[in-house]
Amino acid sequence: MEFLGLTRKLPPFAAVRAFEAAARVGSIKEAANELHLTASAVSHQIRALEDYLDTALFRRVGNRIELTLTGRAYSAKLTTLLDAFDETTRSVKDAGRRPFRVHCTPGFAARWLVPRLDRLSFGDKVRISVSNGAPSTDFASNNADVVIQWADEPVQGVITEPLMQSARYPVASPATVGKLGLHKPEDLCRATLMHDETMDAWGEWFASAGVEPPIFPCGPTFPNCELATTAAEQGQGVALAYDAVVRATLESGILVRLFDAITMPFVMYSVAYPRSRTDDPMVREFSEWIHAEAHAAGVAAHDGQYRSSAEGLRV
């Protein structure tokens, strides 16, 4: 087996660095100032590189230098390589110091991400920002390293990794269930229903339950499912919650799942990050960690059949 590391033939790095700097700034003196060397040392390094390559990289024209055609082509490639080397080195060096910024919905943050952060090796460095609507995947302006994207629509220049799928079902506080006597799906026609302006699916759920929905359903409309679910926790009515997000809340007894009927499962969240950050070590570790968490919870987007937590149903 041949190892690339044993067959590479690389010129001295100091010589490469001196040549690239001189080619980029067009001056031996300015390159020397940038590299904190003497002009004589830079000239010596460039001559050493030319000897190594057995070709001229510069033409000396009086007190000036001009790149040869070979030098121009070589320097352009070296600048690209050294810029990438610098960016990769900075990302590794800064990984243990800078915050890691995650942009997501409030429901995902509060009910799913935050309770698990202590299982991420750099969870104490995560900084979370939330949005009322679908989080922006414009990484030029969202000040994020990773976005937990709503659904899995492709975005140009962005890697989108489907993360989590979920069905929805009604939930309410135990007090609401007792007060309204919610014993069968038809009983929801007289209940106060919490509506979600982002993706209200009450019509789909009533159809799944085989119940004619109320013509004029009563209840407030919220900008996202988290506020609707929080209102249900406070005894204000019944919310249509995402199973993948509210499982822990159901286990705590704060909310109760109502009935077996569910909406059709779909990919509700994806991990999104700039294509240029594909090899960033913190991005990679976060992505691998959160996919593993979704898989362990039984809600991963590519785990095959969807498993419902409360009833063990498969769809």
Image (spheres, helix red, strand yellow):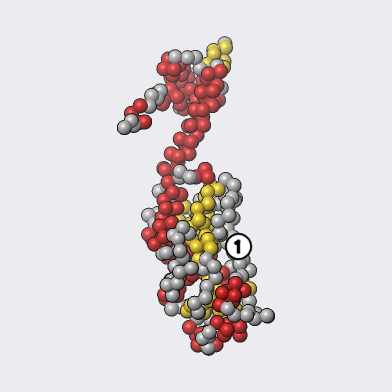
| Residue 61 can be seen in this image | yes
Q: How crowded is the residue under tag 1: few (<14 C-alpha within 10 Å), some, or many (20+)?
A: some
Instruction: Residue at 44%, 67% (x, y): give it.
Output: 307
Residue at the top extreme of this rendering: 62
| Residue 40 can be seen in this image | no
Foreground residue, 84 or 29? 84
Label 1 sits on what residue type? Gly
Foreground residue, 74 or 99? 74
Q: Where is residue 184 in the image (x, y as percent from the top left)?
A: 53, 84
Q: Where is residue 305 in the image (x, y as percent from the top left)?
A: 45, 64
* Above or below: residue 186 compared with residue 46: below
**The residue tagged with tag 1: helix, strand or loop?**
loop
- Which residue in the structure is indicated by mark 1? 133
Instruction: Residue at 52%, 66% (x, y): give it.
Output: 265
* Above or below: residue 259 compared with residue 5: below
Residue at the left extreme of this rendering: 1
Q: Position of residue 214 (x, y in %)?
A: 65, 81
Foreground residue, 38 or 115? 115
Q: Position of residue 20 (x, y in %)?
A: 50, 25
Instruction: Residue at 60%, 72% (x, y): give it.
Output: 204
